Amino acid sequence: MVTTTARTLSFREEVENLLHAEEGASLVRCIQCATCSAVCPVVEFMDHTPRMLIGLINAGMKDEVMASNTFWTCASCYACTEKCPEGIRPADVMYALTRYSLWRDTFNRDWVAPEFSRRFTKTILRTGKSYEPGYAPAFIFEGGFSGMVREMQMGLKLLTKGRMPLIPSRIKRIHNLRAMVARVMPLDGIE
Amino acid sequence: MSRYAYYPGCSLETMAATYHVSSMEVAHKLGMELEEIEDWNCCGATAYSHVDELLATVLCARNLAIAEKQGLDIVAPCNACYKNLWTTNAALKRDPDLAEHMNYALEADDLHYDGGIEVSHIMDAFSTPEILEVIRQKANDRLKGLKVAPYYGCQIVRPRRPGLELSQVDNPQYFEELLRAAGADPVPYPYKLRCCGAALMVTNRRAAVQMVRDLLQNAVDSGAEVIATACPLCQTNLECYQAEVNHAYDADYAMPILYFTQLLGVALGVGVKRLGIGKELVSPDIVLKRAKAGASSASS
């Protein structure tokens, strides 16, 4: 008789399971060549380079990975994904980690990006469309008072040029859209 | 006559309204019909994928299903909308389980998607061999000698669509070809595929401002008089935040940033007002002068 023991998933497997709709090579294929880090235009603003982050995932160092700002700093330009010689899709790994950190609530409260993505998503579930001025107020304080003044000046100029509407637009069948979303995920998970 | 389902995307109703009007004018001049997707919704930008993959998929699926109902292939003017719609379309076509799940959700809006349409960027539609020929025939000489940096951005070519060679995404030439057809003089712009920072302008200002600075400096070094863009986020970051770059780096950039459709429009003889030129925070004087000079010589 064959006996089997339940096995806990490694952190790498957990991350790879979050990539269900994507095609791409397994992270075990990473040869640590750092092509991803070399072509990344935001690498200097990351706690860990993409190469280091993948190395940490493969080593199972979950706490270090989840505390890193790397995946919230990714701008989704896909330069790494284009160039990886092993066919790994680092940009999609970054997306997977942002989802993981929102679900597990592990993100650093000082970061703007998680709150921005949440707010963006909530707006769409209310109106069906994105509304740029709605996101700005909470974030412009990052630049201090003078930054805020400059941002407001820009907003006013855009307003006078007709590029900044005061009323968000809304799709007609927003109720159907919400019912549709509710069929793939619980709405109270985001709202 | 070519006819497409047109997916404007949210920015084209607000910050990028000039991209919308100039796309419409150019399409009209080229005998192309753009039929707006009825009651379209936001594509999700990068935010939905940060939150939930199925959410990102279902919201794009709705737009695909409506366009399929209209019986038309989609064109999208925004790089991010294009990439999201394209990616979702490809996923639904290759994964029947995902398609079944999404169709169950789409029922809530009386929709169904059979995977019967394609998604293109609007620049693809404006640069087919036939349309390029029409542009060459109809273009005036108002852009002649104008040094334009063709700024593709990221998601218009990345991630690479199946069937494309690496060279086609590493050093594409179709933007340059389109500008040449319109009579302009595209300059070699090494950073043409480098990221503008996208939403980092909100979430990581220091990073995005540096990225925009690099793009502006590279355009100056390339001898460009104007940067042409194909994405509302690129245009907004490069143009509206140029003052922020000047502030952060004690610089004095004054690089006009226009949508490629606005330049095409000038070459096709559309008036600058109808193209939305003049609503910028960085004045595109050099293009305005040319457009007006052309207009006066045409009327004389």
Image (spheres, rainbow, N blue to C red):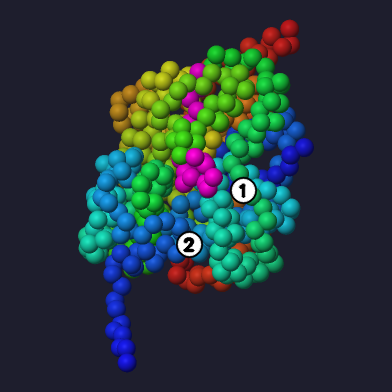
- In this picture, residue B49 sits left or right of residue B180: left
Are the two marked residues, 2 and 1, in contact with CB atoms closer than 8 angstroms? no
Q: Are marks 2 and 1 on the same chain?
A: no
Under tag 2, what secondary structure? loop
From the viewer's perspective, is residue B142 above or below residue B194? above
Secondary element under disc 1, as helix, strand or loop, is strand
Residue under pointer 1: B119
Q: Position of residue B171 (x, y in %)?
A: 46, 32
Q: Residues within 10 Å of mark 1 (few under 14, many from 20)?
A: many
Residue B89: where, in percent of width, then height? 58, 55
Residue A29 lies, in percent from the top left, at: 32, 56
Residue A141 as seen in the image, left or right of residue B168: left
Residue B276: image quadrant is top right
Q: Residue at x 61, y 37 (%)?
A: B124
Q: Could one spot residue A55 in this view of the protein?
A: yes
Looking at this view, is A183 or B240 the one in front? A183
Looking at the rendering, in which quadrant would you find the N terminus of chain A?
A: bottom left
In this image, A79 relative to B162: left or right?
A: left
Q: Main secondary structure of the magenta part?
A: loop
Which stretch did the figure color magenta?
B147-165
Q: Position of residue B79 (x, y in %)?
A: 52, 42
Residue B30: in magenta span: no
CA neighbours of label 2 inside 10 A, class few (<14), some (14 to 19), many (20+): some
Q: CA distance from mark 2 to mark 1?
A: 19 Å
Q: Amino acid at mark 2?
A: Ala
Q: Would you identify the image quadrant in which residue A55 lies? A: bottom left
Residue A80, above or below A8: above
Q: Please name the residue that numbered disc 2 is placed on.
A: A21
Circle 1: residue type: Val
Left or right of residue B9: residue A91: left
